[in-house]
Amino acid sequence: MSAPHNDANFGIGTLCMISICVKNLNKRYRARDGDVPALADVNIEVAEGEFVTIVGPSGCGKSTLLYILGGFLGADGGTIEVNGKAVTGPGVDRGIVFQEYALFPWLTVAQNIRYGLEMSGTPGRQCAEIVERLVRTIGLQGFEHRFPRELSGGMKQRVAIARTLAYDPKILLLDEPFGALDALTREGMQDELLRLWQATRKTVVMVTHDVNEAVYLSGRVLVMSQRPGRIVQEFPVTIDRAGEREVTVLNDDFNHLRNEVWLAVRRQAGANAGASEAARDA
Amino acid sequence: MPVAERAHAARGMLAALWAALRYCYPLLLVLLLWELVARAELIRPLFLPTVTTVLEQFWVLLFEGEIVAPLLVSLYRAFAGLALAVVFGVLAGLWMARSKWAHWALDPLVSLGFPAPKIAFVPIFILWFGIDHLSKILLVAFTCVFPMIVATYHGAAAVSRTVIWSAEAMGTSERKLLSRIIFPAAQPYIFSGVRVTVPVALIIAFTAEMIAGGGGVGAALMFAQRFFQTPTVFVYILVMLATGLVLDLVMLRLRHWLIPWDDEAV
Amino acid sequence: MALSVAPRAWLQGGSLSSWLRAAARYLPIAIVVLVWQLVVEFDLVDRAFLPSFSETVRALWEMTRNGEIVVNLLVSLYRALGGLLIGSLLGVAIGLAMATSRRADQFFGPLVATTYSLPKTSLVPLFILWFGIGNVTNMLSVVLACLLPVIVSTYHGVKAVPPVIVWSARAMGTPHRLVLWRILLPSASLSIFTGIRIALGFCFVLTISAEMIASRTGIGKLIFFYGESGAYAYMFGGLLAIVIVAYAADRALLAAMHYFLRWHDSIHAAHAGG
């Protein structure tokens, strides 16, 4: 049963490269009255071409983890290796998409998308071709020369994703990419992301608080505990994504898995704040 | 206080002193450099007296009454002018925010007057109001009224219309609306405007005195310069600097006291 | 304040042409000028104290014809705008350094905070002692006056750049030295321009002040000279000239801002400050 859309299942004996390897990761924030632990002993392995999502209660440190993976923040302990090399800073092998889009407001849509290409020294003609192709892929023909202020949230996020894909990083880091969008736009964007991933097979690590989204998109869902965050549970996702969204979402397997993940997250969220509640429920 | 606590408090104060010194190190560096260069006479004393000479001259002038009296004159002019500007500016700004006709009538005048270098009006004000206090006070008022109008207007215009509609729905008259809703809401902006305008008032007062004479620190400064009394020139510059600093600190304290409910650093 | 906030109600009614609308906008000024003229015409005010508008215009016209106004305006503009340019470039550089380097912040910070309260015109007599009467004294005062607002606004603008913008740029391979030029400066440009606009106001004030205190040339000197010699129509003429020039310069800067910052989502709100 290896339908082309059944992504998560690599099968026993499949040779795969470990793309991202996180061991015993620790992170502390310096506050006025002592240190606040953000991440404690995080261990993750992501294979090449995998789509992994990290979920957890608010403030558990999942975004922090992503920023450390991206090289924007440093760790206080443990190791992170990407494709065998330690992470020392941001790099073109790890593209990032932020919840706030982080588009360069003084550049047009086209200029934003070609930015990474310019940085890598791609010749002008090639730039233009890649930009044109991406603009068509995200469906924003006619908007190439608009500024981000003239775009809606969904359009901005599409540009942000296109911008990151333009220079073809091997790994995609997504920090709650659709968090700022309304529900309908979010669903459309999720489908687009899925299509893009299925076409490019990049390694994706996504952080989200939306459990639905996590199960819908990824091959593996990791649940993080309350602060200080650590990975406490893992759910392989083996749903069938062959059909349309309606088919997938209304499927029993999907809902069952989604409920399990949701419960797991809820348990983590209530872990500290619900000792008495748990006693009551027992 | 028991000994241990006293020692701890002393250490705390020492630490604070050390931190303050560390913060000021560029200033101390400049002063040191100045003193050394002047002592070695790398620049002639006529052009650069030593720091110690300047400080000595300060005491001399202070005891001769040449510091406090002119300073009070300048401050009087600056603040009288500022008071006028604040009163007129706030009234005009509020009116412009509430009345479309007032806005239409005053806006081009404010737009024209704001960028104009109003110091150029010194000769006119001297012609009309003489060389003593009145001309300086009115020039200060004329210069400061523009930023006050703008600040008040922005503060009043920033009141969200839903707030105004709620008040109107509850039967607030126009006058009450102005005094109990709009004016308080605009206060942070007005205060910010005053804070920014205080140094302007000082500058205009000092500069007008430098150009036209008639008492005050500016005139004293020009007098010293004309007779090449360089240490005195430096003393008056430092007096102006100190006055500006003290006033700004006072404004900061005043803000905390007058508008404690506003947490926005406008 | 742009008149975009003007009384739209009656202006938009009907089919008024844009010409009429522009005229309506400047009507209050025309009314003031009219009142000015009438007040003097009907001897409500002594002609010795207030020449009429027509006299002022005539005097200005004469000064334009014999080149006096143009020469002096050019001298003053050279000093003012030259000082503004140097002060702005230095100010941006220092502000940028302060915002990106802890060392620079610790060094310049206290210096900026202290000299902020010093009226730069007070340095004019000192500069006259040091450099005599002329362009150096004038321009140096202007540079110092323009430095501080530009430093402060650049500093705040750069500090306010959202980290995710810098992070995105770095993730896309921007080397450190380019981040400054291609990311920080464009991102902070609204703030920087606002600081330059404030400095523009200062540069005229400083130039005129220095010229009035002591100078042989310049529009400030011209106004002062005619004031001293009692030729009030000419004094008012010079005044009118500089008010118009300063207004035009401010509008030009605003227009430049609107063009270079047309991508900014709050450029229209940035009309704050007249």
Image (spheres, coloured by chain):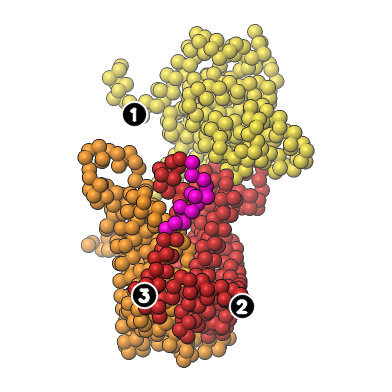
Give the colour of chain A: yellow
The answer to if C138 sits in the magenta stretch is no
The answer for which chain carries disc 2 is C
Locate residue B94, reporting x and y percent.
32, 54
Q: Which tint is chain B?
A: orange
Magenta stretch containing residue C24, yes or no? Answer: yes
Marks 2 and 1, how far apart at CA: 86 Å
Q: Residue furthest front?
A: C42
Can I make out residue B122 in this image? no
C-alpha separation, residue under disc 3 versus residue under disc 2: 31 Å
- Predominant secondary structure in magenta? helix
Give whichever of B181, A125 is nearer the camera. B181
Chain part drawn in magenta: C15-28
Q: Secondary structure at mark 1?
A: helix
Task: Measuring from the top left, give residue C248's x and y in whole percent.
Answer: 54, 62
Residue A19 is left or right of residue C191, and the answer is right
Residue visible at 43% across and 28% down? Answer: A57
At label 1, counting other C-alpha atoms closer than 10 Å, the crowd grade (few under 14, some 14-19, many 20 or more) is: few
Residue at 32%, 77% in the rendered image: B134
| Amino acid type at mark 2 | Asn
Q: Which residue is mark 3?
A: C43
Query: Where B172 sits versus C232, above or below?
Result: above
Q: What color was chain C assigned in the picture?
A: red
